[in-house]
Every structure is written in structure tokens, then in C-alpha cells.
Amino acid sequence: MLEKTVFVEEISGSMQVDAPFVVEAADLKEKRDGGRYIQLTISDKTGHGACKVWGTSDQSAEEIEAVCCAIRPGEVYRIWGYAKVYNGTCEVNVNDGISCLADPMPQEGFDPSLFVYAPVDLDEVRRRLGGMIAKIDDPGIASLVLEVIDSTPGFFEAPAAKFHHHAYIGGLAEHTLEATEIALSLSGTVNRTRMDTDVLLAGALLHDVGKAACFRHQGFSFVALPEYTLVGHTAIGAAAVLRHSAGVDPSRFAHILHIVMAHHGPYGEVKPRTPEAWAVHFADNASAFLRAALDDTADLAPEEERKGARCRQTVYRF
């Protein structure tokens, strides 16, 4: 059994890598010459890393594609290659080591604590989410939020996204908490505002609840289901909210549902029409973008900058 002696946070340029990692995602990419390569996201307890699988010179594009299709995200694979810095990002490059991706390594032989990236204190997140729900004065709306969350398997375990923000175990619950706290803060910051804070809190707490149904646990991680793109978490979340409308004033319930449907702001099919809906949209974006920017700057040296892989903007460390 190959021992876990190298971790993601230790990988640096010109370093030979030969160690087991969780493969979070495998995407087939096209080279400029028409060939194929595989873009992997790898992880362990220290975080996420990038890996490009080029294969050997005698392998065809079809063979590379077959390897990619056979990879099972969430499982542990031997990553054998060399690291280099490209466009400011350190990534592992794999050539001959493509043979190691034929089959995952037996999960039973590894200590899960070395592979599971879960930076969230879930007990603290649960406590603070409970505090947000307790701020809702209307008992019907408070019950609605509790019933939806309690009847949503995986809400406290699932990630909030595949890659760009809060993409780790517990990420969905953490992002929900952040967005709710930011939305509530916005409602109390703008002068001469009269927002329905019960509706605002419910909309923020439930805006991404549909994401829990878009992931399933596999190996040491979570993988996205087809529903993630074929249906979308907004529609799934709205359906979950609709199942628990009893006991809520119809007008206020419609407002909560509007917030859930409109939380993508001008980019969604439904556009925000109320201050509460805009507040949740801005809070959602603030939590997601700041998490992405913070993760993109985490390993920068002072006075270093690069294009952030998660926030997709140039980031800099002073």
C-alpha cells in the first residue's frame, strides 16, 4: 500500500509527486493540436490541488478520453508525476503515471482523517444557524424553515459548489449561514429601510437548500449528480419549499419563494423584484466571492499576484 507522505499544501514547483490523493473531479480538455488531456482536482485533508494528465506520446485522444471516463470522483488514486508552476498556479503533471488512474486504490487501507477536507466546525455552524432561525418572529415561517432543513438529507454535509466556493464537506451549511448573516446585516445598514426581516431570513436560509439534492457521498468526498446541471438547485429548492407552505400567510410565503427563485439576481431566470430578494442575492454573491478570493490568495507569497482559479479575478497579497 502506498503511504500518504505528501499532502496538497506541501506540493511545490519542480517537485516529484508519488502519493495517494482523492480525485474530486475529472474533466476532459482539448489541446491546441486537437489532442486530449485530463484536468483533475485532487484533495486531501489540507485542501484542493490541480493536476493535468497528459498521458504518453503514443496514446491517442480516444485512449485519454477512456481513462477520463473511467475515473470515479471521490475515490483515492495514486498520483505519480511532477509539479510545476503554470500561470501562477502549482499543478501536478502526469505522463507515464496515467496508468495509475486505471483503478482507484482500496479505500479500506487508508485513514479517512488524512483524506477528508472538512474545514467547517459544523457544531458551531448548526448553533449559529439555529440562532438565525430564532430571530424569525412568525412561528409559521420559523416552522417552515425548520421543516425544510430537517427534511433535507445532506444539508449539513454537502458542499455548496463543485469547485468555485465552499466546495468541501459542510460547505453548503457554512455558505447558508454566511449569506443569512450578511443579508440581515444589509437590512439593518441601509437608512430608512422597511424590510420584512422574517421573509428575508427565511429566504436566505432556504436559498440554496436544493443543492443538497445535487450531490451524493462517494468515497471520501461528494460528487455532483446530473441534477446539478440538468435541473438546477433553484428549482429543486423551490419544490422543497412548496411542500411546507401550510401555516404561512400566502403573501409572505410567495415572497419567500420569490427570494429562493430570484437569488441569482440578474443572471437568473427570475429577477429580484423586492429589496429583500436583492439583499439575499447580494449576500449570496458576497459569501461566494469572498470565499473564492480568500482561497485563491491563501498560498500567495507577499507581493505575488495571479488569476484566481476560483474567483476568476486577479488576486494579490500585500
Image: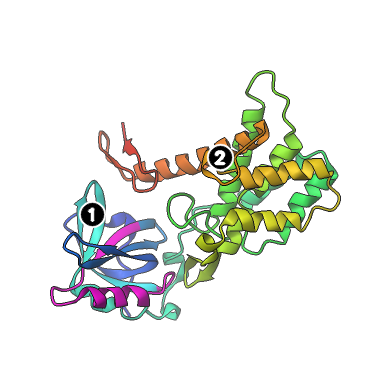
Q: Quadrant of residue 270?
A: top right
- Give me the residue at 65% from left, 64% from top: 153
Q: How is the image coloured?
A: rainbow
Mark 1 vs mark 2: give the one in front: 2
Provide the residue designation for mark 2.
265
Which of the two residues, 307 or 299, is positioned nearer the viewer here?
A: 307
Please give left or right for residue 136 compared with residue 318 in the image. Answer: right
> Residue 229: x and y, percent?
50, 60
Q: Residue furthest right?
A: 247
Q: Which residues are magenta?
A: 49-75
Residue 208 as seen in the image, left or right of residue 107:
right
Residue 193 in the image: x percent, y percent?
Answer: 69, 23
Relative to 52, is 68 above or below? below
- Is residue 149 in view? no
Q: Is residue 73 magenta-colored? A: yes
Pointer 1 residue: 12
Helix, strand, or loop for circle 1? loop
Residue 258 % position (x, y): 68, 43
Residue pictured at 75% horizontal, 44% vertical: 254
Q: Residue furthest left?
A: 57
Query: Between disc 1 and disc 2, whose residue precedes?
Result: 1
